[in-house]
Image (tube, coloured by chain):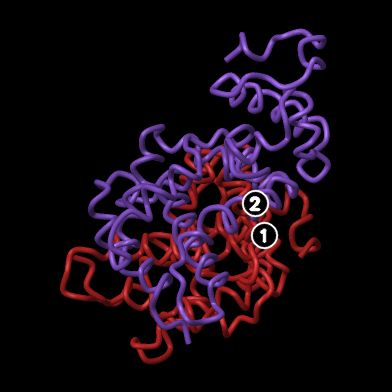
Chain colours: A red, B purple
Amino acid sequence: MTTSVRQDDGDRRRGRRPGGTDTRAALLAAAREVFSEQGYDGATVRAIAGRAGVDAAMVNHWFGGKDALFGEAVLRLPFSPKELLATLLDGDPADLGERIVRTFLTRWDAQDGGVFAALVRSVAGHEQVAHALRDFFIRGVFGQLVPTVADDRRELRANLVAAQMIGIGMVRYVAKFEPVASTDIETVVTAVAPNIQRYLTGRLD
Amino acid sequence: MTTSVRQDDGDRRRGRRPGGTDTRAALLAAAREVFSEQGYDGATVRAIAGRAGVDAAMVNHWFGGKDALFGEAVLRLPFSPKELLATLLDGDPADLGERIVRTFLTRWDAQDGGVFAALVRSVAGHEQVAHALRDFFIRGVFGQLVPTVADDRRELRANLVAAQMIGIGMVRYVAKFEPVASTDIETVVTAVAPNIQRYLTGRLD
């Protein structure tokens, strides 16, 4: 990643980069700089793309938008939302709750919950990060998972799914309550999935 | 509170205080000092009672134990667990999930979620606080709420209820996702209570 980023400013100013992973890595590095200098609201897609020396359309092409770029570059989430959503939505909607619990725990467990805990620290400590996460998780992740049902509760459902997964993460990785902190993933899946499924498609009134 | 605490050391060494709210206030003040000096594990009930100039039995009498004293003195939780539990357990067990959601949100809302957010910051930042909270919430609060059912899942159930309430608190007060951040309490109660009730008494396998 470093080689594609550490080009000199002259290179950057000469215009667009060739496509491919170099562009992606350059955008990540530029995003870290620009978000850090300007904050989430101040950082524009145009400024980030300019810093990376690529066209602004590349942000949408590689990340799907500013929220997702923030998630991957600054929060260093170990997944691209696009790829995560594709995995989760591939299957029977009736089992979506189960896939959500299993997928999140599997990915979080893979770094011993470190990324989840770091995320909570960021959100709890910085109003601006909380704001960015709102957009990222509700619009970019959980909002996309809620099946199109004939009610006006899609945002509430996305909130509730997020709340349940954040709570499980808090108990497993941050507060480390037993038995949830040490139990196997499938025990948690079996216990929690029906509740997630109700938030996704059940009656909420 | 200050008057009962700022007695001179001679007074303290002369032995037990008279009972009543003076004792309670003195124990709270002593607990803040001793927990801060010794940490949670290092602070003994005997040391706290000694600092307050009262008998160690007063800690159990007024707070029910070291965990609860920690919760009230250091975490400054706006309730005594004893009184909270009495409120929650007073009623039909089939409606316990509903009472839990309504009661926690009502109390957290009363300080605009400030106590909840402060709690999360403490837990995320300090392993020792997380440890104390484990004992406080799981043994002292949620563990006491799980009805005696004929299974060996009582601790798992307590974990799951805690996870759901922590998650709702995170979304409403810390991450401030909409609509949960701004909606009325009863909307959240209606949406979340059946899930809490399943964790309390439903099948988890």
| Residue shown at 60% from the left, 37% from the top | B75
The numbered dot on residue A26 is 1
Q: Chain of mark 2?
A: A
Residue B16 versus residue B187: which sits nearer the camera? B16
On the image, the x and y values in percent for residue A143 come to 36, 66
Do tags 1 and 2 sit on the same chain?
yes
Q: Which chain is disc 1 placed on?
A: A
Q: Is residue A149 left or right of residue B143?
A: left
Residue at x-position 76% and y-position 65%: A1
Q: Where residue B49 sits in the image (x, y, percent)?
A: 74, 30
Q: Residue at x 75, y 38 (%)?
A: B45
Mark 1 Cα shell of 10 Å, populated few (<14), some (14-19), many (≥20): many
* Amino acid type of the residue that numbered disc 1 sits on in the rendered structure: Ala
The residue nearer to you, when weighing B166 against A179, is A179
Report x, y in % for residue B16: 72, 22
Q: Secondary structure at mark 1?
A: helix
Q: Is residue B89 above or below residue B21?
A: below
Residue B13 or residue A180, whichever sits in front: B13
Q: Which mark is residue B89?
A: none
Mark 2 — residue? Answer: A30
Proximity of marks 1 and 2: CB atoms separated by less than 8 Å: yes
| x 38%, y 66%: residue | B196
Amino acid type of the residue tagged 2 in the rendering: Ala
Q: Seen in the image, is A160 located left or right of residue B61? A: left
Q: Quadrant of residue B29?
A: top right
Q: Please count the marks in the image.
A: 2
